[in-house]
């Protein structure tokens, strides 16, 4: 099966390129983990204009996985994917503008516009959360503070995706009667669920990376 997919990828079949790239990146189904090969296949798929591949190649460049770290080149790929309204690319580019990464001049207005576009896609929680934060404090005049809008976005991220940061922010807004009526009961439920979940997603990812590097005790 793996050989068949590899042959199809070599013949220009883009879904097979993505499948092979994922296999090399994670090291699945008997394929040894090989991040340089993963990057090579993501970049080849990216050259066809596939937004998922452009984001993946940009992300590996940004992190220096399988290729020399180059944040500027990574963000160039993010721009290509963002032009196709790829949610994760929009969020990643927005964060780069917010924090001034990759040689970018910090620009909260551009960041919030990108977060808004990401939120409009409705495909993950990060865009909803990031736009909500823009509306919470105005980001230095980038947008008008709008607590009611921020609350709506946090509700969508919390209810639709179980986003933990959104639950924390929303719970605190409900306690403080920000953007709507106070609701101590729902606030308690949100904050309790967030406390129970903690930061396990990041912990699991760190453990996986340690394991793949051979540090089984650390994992």
Image (spheres, rainbow, N blue to C red):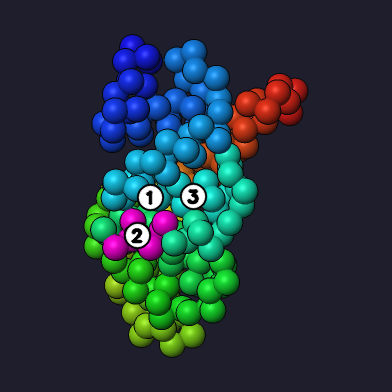
Residue drawn at 41 percent across, 58 percent down? 78
Q: CA distance from mark 2 to mark 1?
A: 7 Å
Q: Which residue is mark 3?
A: 59
Are the residues tagged 2 and 1 within 8 Å (C-beta)?
yes
- Residue 92 forms part of the magenta stretch: no
Across and down, in percent, residue 98 comes to 50, 72
Q: Which residue is mark 2?
A: 80
What kind of secondary structure does the magenta stretch mostly adopt? helix
Secondary-structure class at tag 3: helix
Residue 16 versus residue 129 in the image, above or below: above
Stretch of the chain drawn in magenta = 77-83
208 in relation to 143, above or below: above
Q: What's the residue at 24%, 62% (across, down)?
A: 120
Q: Quadrant of residue 66?
A: top right
Is 36 left or right of 79, judged from the image as shown? right
Residue of label 1: 54
**Structural distance between the alpha carbons of marks 3 and 2:** 13 Å
Q: Residue furthest front?
A: 11
């Amino acid at each position: 099966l793996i050989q068949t997919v590899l042959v199809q990828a070599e013949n220009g079949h883009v879904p097979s390129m993505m499948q092979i790239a994922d296999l090399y990146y994670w090291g699945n189904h008997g394929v040894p983990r090989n991040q340089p090969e993963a990057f090579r296949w993501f970049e080849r798929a990216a050259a066809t204009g596939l937004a998922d591949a452009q984001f993946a190649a940009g992300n590996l460049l940004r992190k220096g996985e399988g290729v020399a770290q180059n944040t500027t080149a990574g963000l160039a790929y993010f721009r290509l994917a963002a032009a196709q309204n790829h949610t994760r690319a929009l969020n990643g580019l927005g964060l780069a503008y917010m924090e001034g990464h990759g040689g970018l001049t910090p620009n909260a207005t551009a960041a919030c516009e990108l977060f808004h576009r990401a939120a409009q896609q409705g495909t993950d929680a990060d865009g909803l959360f990031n736009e909500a934060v823009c509306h919470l404090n105005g980001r230095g005049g980038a947008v008008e503070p709008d607590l009611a809008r921020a609350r709506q976005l946090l509700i969508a991220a919390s209810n639709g995706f179980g986003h933990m940061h959104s639950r924390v922010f929303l719970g605190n807004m409900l306690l403080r009667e920000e953007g709507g009526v106070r609701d101590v009961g729902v606030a308690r439920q949100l904050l309790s669920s967030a406390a129970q979940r903690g930061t396990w997603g990041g912990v699991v990812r760190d453990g996986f990376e340690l394991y793949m590097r051979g540090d089984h005790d650390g994992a």
